[in-house]
Amino acid sequence: MEDNGTTEIDLRLKAMAPLPTPVEAKACTRMWIPAARLTAEHHIDEILRSLASDTQPEIWRHARPHLRDFVRIPHQGIAFLCTSDTALHNLGGIQLKICDIPVTIRKYSLYDKLYFVDLLRLPNDVPDQRIYEWFVEREARPVLITPTYVHGLLQSHGRTIYFGEVGCPKGLFDSDGNPLREIYFVEDDKPCFTPAPTPRVYDIRRRQHGGR
């Protein structure tokens, strides 16, 4: 029940009370837990319940107040934000057991604060220089291009593109402000379909009959 003395600010604060305290984007860093099997077999509520367990390592338990916005990406892993530099550096490489499945938190990189996209199903005939030039032409100059996955001396063909800003570059939107849906690194070749900038995944597929 509301009384006559309740202000709009009071109502807003009450409605948003269960949410985490807002933090500036520049104070947040994305962290990543590669976990293909885990995210294929378990939902986010099961994952969070396991992460909240007191059986997790002490370093993780102490860092939990600084962690937020967990996202399950099926068949890939778990993304989340960290708001503490100390926790950021302490958590890298730590092993957890989530839903009885062992996983390891990826170590922090200076580039993790920057916006990035992953290029999936990249055609074999697209050179890295062309990828770089395409983004430069869109006024979204990459500051780093890396293989998406690296294990020892083995590297995946997929590419991850980092940009010199925290938010999505304007060049990844069309003239009407809509997210780009297709990228042609080579004209009349295989297009890159982009569901939205926020998932940061560029899915490259084979064109059929002039369309998807």
Image: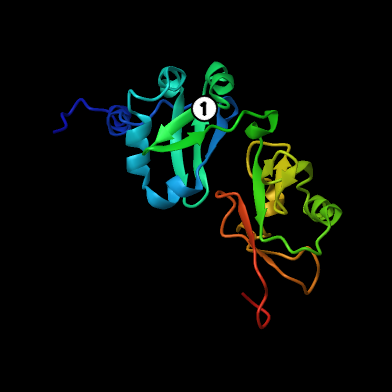
> How far from the left and from the top, in percent, is residue 53?
33, 27
- Quadrant including the C terminus: bottom right
- Quadrant including the N terminus: top left
| Left or right side of 35 for 119 | right
- Residue type, numbered disc 1: Cys
Front residue of 63 and 2: 63
Residue lying farthest to the bottom in this orientation: 209
| Left or right side of 176 for 71 | left
**Residue 203, relative to residue 73: is it above or below?**
below
The residue at 69%/28% (across/down) is 110
> How far from the left and from the top, in percent, is residue 18?
31, 30
| Left or right side of 188 for 193 | left
Q: Which residue is mark 1?
A: 82
> How far from the left and from the top, in percent, is residue 185?
78, 63
Q: How many marks?
A: 1
Front residue of 114 and 64: 64
